[in-house]
Amino acid sequence: MAPDSNRSNIFSSNSNPGDTDVFTVSRLNREARRLLEGGLPNLWVSGEISNLARPGSGHIYFTLKDDKAQVSCAMFRGNNRKLNFHPEDGSLVLLQARVSIYEARGNYQLIVEHMEDGGEGLLRRKFEDLKARLSKAGLFDVQHKQNLPKLPGRIGIITSPTGAAIRDILHILKRRFPTADIIIYPTRVQGDGANDEIIHALQVAINRNECDVLIIARGGGSLEDLWSFNEENVARAIYDCPLPIISGVGHEIDFTITDLVADVRAPTPSGAAELVTPDKDELLRTFTAIDRRAELSLRRLWAAQSEQHKQLSSRLNRIHPGAVLGQLQQRSDELIRRLTTSTQEHLETQQAEYQQLTMRLRNAVPAEKLARLTERLNAKQQQLTSVMRHILNAVSSRAAITAGSLNAVSPLATLERGYAIVWSSTSGKLLNNAGNLKPGDRIKTQLAKGQFEATVEKTIPEKPTKTGKTKADKL
């Protein structure tokens, strides 16, 4: 990229085109994308999904909107495989994304790297933001934690007087340390205004100063159900409390701001009752405290390392060929959609033209005329058949007459009357004069039926007539 001074010259309104570096559209979009991706970190954005598309490439494209604006989003296949829910149109979601531009069309868009369900996702984000802010303010620091009394004479419990949590706590306290007095500070533990009631109960316990230790407890539930224990005013009230506090909120897998700011976090209300009572194994309590401090330290370290990893990943994404590949993949999906649409439109046009030609062809076929011509053709064929039959009969008659005439003059007919045809076997010439033969010559004789060969033994010349000519000469 050019230095800032050159960049200001490029975009100066007073410069002439011949004196500056003129951008092409593709270069302009590329520079704009680099500015956005380099100038903005990964962001958390919430909104509603619309126009969601899942092409064959495995990527997800959709529009994220609220009641005033919208933005295009793309989530590539490698990231959407990590989804733990099925997004669809109308889904409220929380996204972690980087700002970019689709260079082929100059569209401003978000490249989504992480997506959460909007209901619990927003609360989870709010939880993380509050956790980070209170941690920075020092509310979770170990040096502010108070030690629990080894032998509490009076134990205060801030919880709902009708819930399952109070029954579990009372049962364990009675079993493990029946000599302790129990004071219950009733309060709602869920719903609007529950956080104010928790603070009020806590203030009553502080003002009376009648307990050695306090337990804040409720049973398990969703993040929304436990949200009263994730309010900042509740966290600060617990932090300012001079009495040691054990937090036993939810199940073991639940984790609230109250757990972090309290002096001791119990995995369940029953666990809180066990922690507040004397334990026979002092060493186990020591290990539990060390484990808790180590867990908090590891969480802070993990948070710091995760943030550093995100920053490095963001820098790598800006220079990695995968960013260019993502643009090309998005362009490929767009071209496939355009090709599909164009092919469909062309097919529909061809089908319409085919239907028009079919109708024209049907209108151009003269059915009645064709029927008349067919009738005429049949009549002509009948006439032609009659004429041909008449001609054949006439020809047959003439052929019979001609055959009779030919038969009358045919040599075969003569042979039938007893005559024969004789020719020389040597020369193959017909013989009509016995004087041309001599004894010993071979001859062939043709009769009306068959032939035979013979040898001349004697010739008898024909006697001449009075005129001096033989009969053969006369012939």
Image (tube, grey):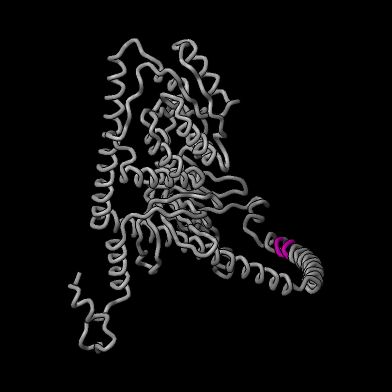
Report the front residue among 190 and 253: 190
402 in the magenta segment: yes
Question: Is residue 149 a member of the stretch shown in magenta?
Answer: no
Q: Residue at x 43, y 21 (%)?
A: 271
Q: Is residue 428 visible?
A: yes
**Across the whole image, how many numbered discs are drawn on residues?**
0
Question: Which one is in front, 314 or 180?
Answer: 180
Q: Quadrant of residue 349?
A: bottom right
Residue 430 percent coordinates (x, y): 50, 58
Quadrant in which residue 412 is drawn: bottom right
Q: Is residue 320 left or right of residue 471?
A: left
* Residue 325 in the figure: left or right of residue 390: left
Residue shown at 48% from the left, 30% from the top: 208
- The C terminus: image quadrant: bottom right
Magenta: main secondary structure: helix
Which of the pair 217/401 is nearer the observer? 217
Residue 177: give x, y in percent of width and height: 44, 12
How far across and down, in percent of the image, does residue 156 sit? 48, 25
Q: Say whether residue 390 is visible.
A: no
Q: Please report the bounds of the magenta region as a residue range.
A: 398-403
Quadrant housing the N terminus: bottom left
* Occupied quadrant, residue 265: top left
Indicate whether 467 appears above or below 428.
below
Residue 37 in picture, x, y percent from top left = 30, 61
- Residue 287 located left or right of residue 394: left
Task: Name the residue nearer the viewer: 456 or 59.
Answer: 59
Please tell me whether residue 440 is drawn above or below residue 22 in the rendered image.
above
